[in-house]
Image: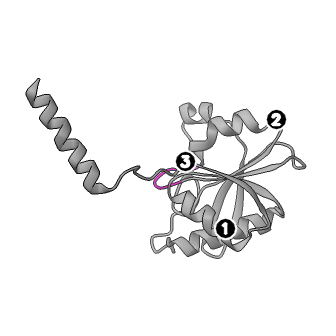
Amino acid sequence: MLSPSVRKEWPFEPSWFSHRDGRLHYVDAGPRDGPVLLCLHGNPSWSFLFRHLLRELQDGFRVVALDHLGCGLSEKPPAGPYGLQAHIDRAEALIAHLGLDRFSLAVHDWGGAIGMGVATRRPDAVQSSSSRTLRPSCPTASRGRSRSVGREASARS
């Protein structure tokens, strides 16, 4: 299923969860009684994005990294459903399946919206969150102006 080069970077044991929308892949690494970190990737990525985090934290934390439906090793049904609420529902189903009462979130990109959806539904369960979901620091108009100022400066040089 995985090439030898990917397998070298991804030495984690695969786990599977059956959901009404399809079969989902996830990694569950580290001590079962450790503090839990739930990793939710963005699009078009997969849990491979968190491979370094998994390696670094699995000795002291239980790190769970989900492949969303349509991504990574999870099933890819042509019709989905692939909307935000469906992704939140599936993340919650995995949380229930694993019996996770308290956890922290590590989210990236689209996983940020999914994670925040989980957090609003389960505010008492989420202990903390870390996001690699960035937004521009300035409005579009300012970015356009900055680019034109930069072009003017380089034209003068």
Q: Circle 1 sits on which residue?
A: 118
Residue 37: x and y in percent read 74, 50
Q: Secondary structure at mark 2?
A: loop
Q: Is residue 42 left or right of residue 23?
A: left
- State the image quarter where residue 97 is shown: bottom right
Residue displayed at 9% across by 30% down: 155
Which residue position holds label 2?
Answer: 59
**Residue 8 image offset from top left, x and y in percent:** 61, 30
The amino acid on which the numbered mark 3 sits, given as a three-letter code, is: Arg
Q: Nearer the viewer, residue 98 or 148?
A: 148
Residue stretch rendered in magenta on the structure: 42-46
Could you tell which of marks 3 and 1 lies nearer the N-terminus? Answer: 1
Q: Earlier in the sequence, mark 3 or mark 2?
A: 2
Q: In the shown orientation, is residue 95 left or right of residue 51?
A: right
Q: Are marks 3 and 1 in contact (CB under 8 Å)?
A: no
Q: Position of residue 91 (x, y in %)?
A: 66, 65
Q: Is residue 44 left or right of residue 116?
A: left
Q: Amino acid at mark 1?
A: Val
Nearest to the eye among marks 2 and 1: give it: 1
Decide: is 10 above or below 104.
Answer: above
Question: Does residue 77 belong to the magenta stretch?
Answer: no
**Residue appearing at x 75%, y 37% in the figure:** 57
Residue annotated with mark 3 = 132
Q: Residue, x 56% and y 35% (percent of image)?
A: 6
